[in-house]
Image (spheres, grey):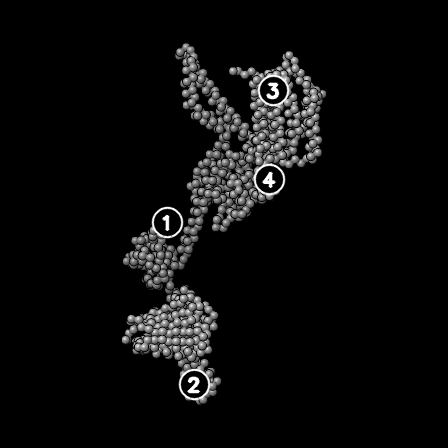
Amino acid sequence: MIFKPVLTASILLFICAFANFFLGFIVFAKSKRTISQIIFAFVSLSLALWCVGIGLFSSNLFPIVRSVGIRLGFFAAAPIPYLALLLSFTFPQKKLHINKYVVAALFIPSLILIVSVFDGMLLKPISTSEGIFLELGPLNMLYALHFIIYFFVAIYNFVKGYFNSSFSEKNRFKYLFAGIIISSLIGILFNVSLVSFFGLSKMVYIGPMGTIFLVAFTTYAILKHRIMDIALVIKKTTAYSLVTTGITFVYVFVVLGFEFAFRAIFGYYSFLASAPAALVIAVTFIPLRDRFQKITDQVFFRKTLEYQNIIKDVTRLIVSVTDLNTLFRLIDRTIIRAMCAKNASILLLEEKENHFLVEKVSGVPKIVKGIKLSLDDHLVRYFYERKDAVVLDEVNGLIQSDIISQKEKEKLIKVSEEMAHFESAVTIPSFLKGKLVGILNLGEKLSGELYNPDDLELLLTMASEAAIAIENAKLYRDITETRDYLNNLVEGSDDAILTVDLEGKVLSWNEGASKIFGFTPSEVLGNQPPFFSHEETIQLVNKVLSKEVLKAIELDRKNKFGRNVPLLLTASHVKDTNGNIIAISAILKDITELRKVDQMKHEFLSIVSHELRTPLTPIKGYTAMLMAEKLGEINSRQKNALEMISKQSNHLHELIDSVIDIARIESGKKISLQKEPIFLEDIINESIKIISESSLSKSVNIEFTAPPDRSAFLGDRKKLIRVLDNLLGNAIKFTPAKGNITVTLEKIKEDIIISVSDTGIGLDAGETKKIFERFYQVDTSYTRSSGGMGMGLSIAREIIEAHNGSIWAESKGAGKGTSLILKLPIEIK
């Protein structure tokens, strides 16, 4: 059925009305409704009702319906100038800074015109046999002036707002202006020009349908999050139209060609001619569409396609980059230049320091490089909230609007200040598994164009791929820095550090090894270590593989020039990523100077000890003579003083003997023993007697138990007494007043066990072995008050071990006493 023009006009006007109403409803239905959104929703409703009225008037329905339609059209159009004026004060997201009384006063003309629609003062529909004619009333001039004045002021406000708006808001105004211009041109063409100059009134219904462009473009401008360049929209629309037109013309010729061929062959046309045409269309549609689209893209979007292809290629390359400097150069030479950005900066997450650091700058002051952003920074937190690109103009637009709370505005002000600090127009986050690892700041384009949604989508895609590259590059950088640091440590060390494989061949050789042994790396790499025989190297490898501890082992080896070098060897294994041992690492320290110092120390101790003994011998002799009154009588005070001198002289003599013994032990000499048959019970009783006399002030009780049969032993009497004196002396020292000390002697098989137990301060688990180390002292008030050098137990261990025995300590913990136990083999039964 072919529609009559009038019926077609009515249907199209109703469709236009529905579209305007639907778009207005979408604007009004947004969760955060601004004043401009509400006002524009009413504008859309008014335009929809106006189209309905015009549609009813254009139909062939009853005269009464057409009469109601024209009144409805004038009724809906009356408030449109007023609403447009209010919209000009609030678009796109501003508050209405007009007094409410002024707002009410501005509505009065519209109210008068609305009322006049029904009382005949504005218009009067007259029904005749030829149709319905409109008789204009006395207020028709007011109606026209109302439209002209209000629309003129509204346009003035829109233009003024455009020049005072931010960069992104200008594009919103462009959409609004595009809608006004297109709808106005359509109205002027079909409702004024064709009617006035050519007398063509059959298409006047098309004029009202132009309002759909105004409503659609303004709706997009109000609601669209990111506004595309208006030129881009026009290009896309034109390109799509050309593609559609081109395909249509091609297929028209295809159909005509088949029809012509069918008539030429068969002499008549049949429906069967459409079958091959349909087949050709089905097969060639997609290739043909792609071909036309490629041609139009080259014409309209050549520049866009160029940098899109560049960014896509760069995105593929980024994944393989493992060096940060290479990554920065790639971004600088491609993405920044393709976007024609004035400046750029890149921030990377430094997890160890918990901040973002500016690693790369381009076109911004060098002082920006090195700036740090904490993980709690406003811009960083905003990225975690949005997980999207941040456009400075959008942020500033939200700050100026009334659709967010004051608290949100304060947060966005901080974000805006951060972006301004980096001279950034758009900031792109780079996320990896929900973690922000990088930030790309891009300045304004040199062309002054906005970053459109296609730009941002490409940049976000690139940033997503770059996140992997950033993490890989940072890991590579950390590994490289660690490797360089370790290499510097190894190469800068004075010690010989080398590695050998499991066959004993040298894999690495540092500068310290060259200094110590005189061999260059080229002489030893791939060969056996020159200072070890093959058997020694394999033995060393096997010891490490069997998890034997090789630490601080002294040995002597000759260097390349035949000089003997004393060394301290430490060896350990090297594992691969699977935990398999693949090499042996060895550190050899030249201890030539240490041995010289050690020898000097031994000589010094020996000399000092003997020199101290020389004056000490006559001191002790004359003190004994004085105490025996061989040089005359002495009184009790003098006797006490001489006893103190004798006691301290004996203590000094013991210290000197200890120093001599320590020097002898450190020089590798064993303690010399003068063995004789002795009874250990007699030695213990003698020591207890001496210790008891010196500890009367503490009232410590000492008990000794032994089996009835006496135990004969072959040993050095003086040195064993010295051991027992030390054990009992320590027990007295660390036992509080009125404590108990128990000494036991027992025979177990072929051994004699002597135990000295006290009720003193006790020992921690880690101290039971340390007390036998030279110069070690338990850090308590007892040792600080009683003194001592910490050599007694060390010497006692050497004496007992010289007798082929052993000594150890046992304690249940602090405050629970200590037992010092020694075991000696029975040599005389």
- Which mark sits nearer the N-terminus, 3 or 4? 3
Q: Which residue type carries mark 3? A: Leu
Position above or below: 577 against 276: below
Q: Which residue type carries mark 1? A: Thr
- Which mark sits nearer the N-terminus, 4 or 1? 4
Q: Residues within 10 Å of mark 2 (few under 14, many from 20)?
A: many
Q: Quadrant of residue 97?
A: top right
- Which mark sits nearer the N-terminus, 2 or 1? 1
Q: Nearer the viewer, residue 703 or 646?
A: 703
Residue 752's x, y, as percent?
32, 72
* Res. 404 mark: 4
* Res. 636 mark: none
Which residue is painted at 65% across and 15% down in the image? 127
Residue lying at the far bottom in this picture: please name it. 632
Which residue is painted at 41% across and 51% down in the image? 483
- Read off the residue under disc 3: 56
- Which mark sits nearer the N-terminus, 3 or 1? 3
Q: Residues within 10 Å of mark 4 (few under 14, many from 20)?
A: few
- Read off the residue under disc 1: 577
Q: Which residue type carries mark 2? A: Met
Residue 789 showing in the rendered view: no
